[in-house]
Image (tube, rainbow, N blue to C red):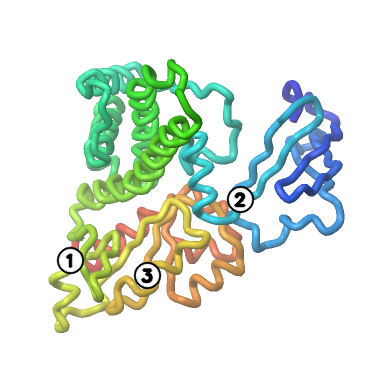
Amino acid sequence: MFDSPRPRGKNEDKFITVKWQNDIETNSRFIYYGQGTRNEYRLTRFGKGFPYLTDDHVGDLFILSHIENDYYEGFVLEADEDIEDFFAAFNISSAETNRLIPKISGISHSDLLSDCFKKYISALKKKFPSTTDLSTTARNCYNGSYKITDQKIEKTPDDILLKWLDAEFGLFKLIELEVYSDRISSPFSTIDELIEYSNTILNRRKSRAGKSLEHQLAEVFSRAKLNFEVQAKTEDNKRPDFLFPNSVSYHDKSFDPENLVFLAAKTTCKDRWRQILNEADRISVKNLFTLQQGISKNQLSEMYKYKVQLVVPKPYISSFPEEYRSQILSLEMFLSIIKEKQFIH
């Protein structure tokens, strides 16, 4: 917003022009509030009738791009697919929102973690590993570098899960640089060839992001010694992401349905949460783990109407409307519920 952090003790502003995706143009203002106890920056003055300030847009992805001088372009992405396409195009994870996207992204890790990654990449010989192998290696490198124990995972599962996801994403970016470096250093002969190669990269990025969350959650459940099954078959060949304790118990009509638990895992869920409603008929409450930060009151109300129970990393709960925070489970709380149902102490 400004060339440098503004000094405390006074307010400062700067007027800008923002062109939005539907050819709306606003004369907006960056303002720094520095008087008294305040120390915050804001973007204000969107004009009458600006369409993106309603509760329905809570949970959308907002992007502000600096073009030149005092001219910016703004975008508000609503659909899960559009949001995931954006993350793939810029090679960032859903956990890397609410920050600047540098023109050239650097990767910084501890020396031990970096050395572990380098050894693994050299053995790949410029080939991509399976998503399972990638997740396992990133997790093992992180655990070894930071001396992560089962006790620490059990004590702070939310934080550890986010660290594992971040480590895996860092490793994937390094592998991309290694695998693609030779090809992207030479020109493409046709536009079609460039587009085909680009789509290959984007599709691999999106596929990895979805599988990453499933793999790392499964490891948390395994370390907690929970009984669970991945992609277990329920009715009509439906396959929920996680079923506790397993499909045998699910199909056993004498097994108490109160001790059956379903969990779907989706990086974003603004649109896709409805997909989980019919994945396990015997289980009335559908648990949904997501990395999305913030969902509107209207949408949360609809989710709870259909008995969808949100589970999010503990640090993300504060991004949700205050009146709903007590109803949202952290990963730690979800593990406690499963342990109680499975009599694990």
Q: Which residue is more in the foreground, 201 or 47?
A: 201
* Residue linked to disc 2: 77
Q: Secondary structure at mark 3?
A: strand
Q: Nearer the viewer, residue 49 or 40?
A: 49
Residue sitting at x 64%, y 41%: 63
Q: Please give the residue where the numbered disc 1 appears in the rendered image.
A: 246
Q: Does 227 sit above or below residue 104?
A: below
Mark 3 to mark 1: distance in Å? 16 Å
Quarter assignment of residue 53 = bottom right
Residue 132: where, in percent of width, then height? 23, 41
Helix, strand, or loop for circle 2?
A: strand
Q: Image check: 194 left or right of 17?
A: left
Q: Tell me whether circle 1 and circle 2 mark residues in contact (CB < 8 Å).
A: no
Residue 259 in sight in this render: no
Mark 2: give few (<14), some (14-19) or many (20+) Cα within 10 Å: some
Up-down relation of residue 59 to residue 232 (above or below): above
Q: Picture quarter containing residue 171?
A: top left
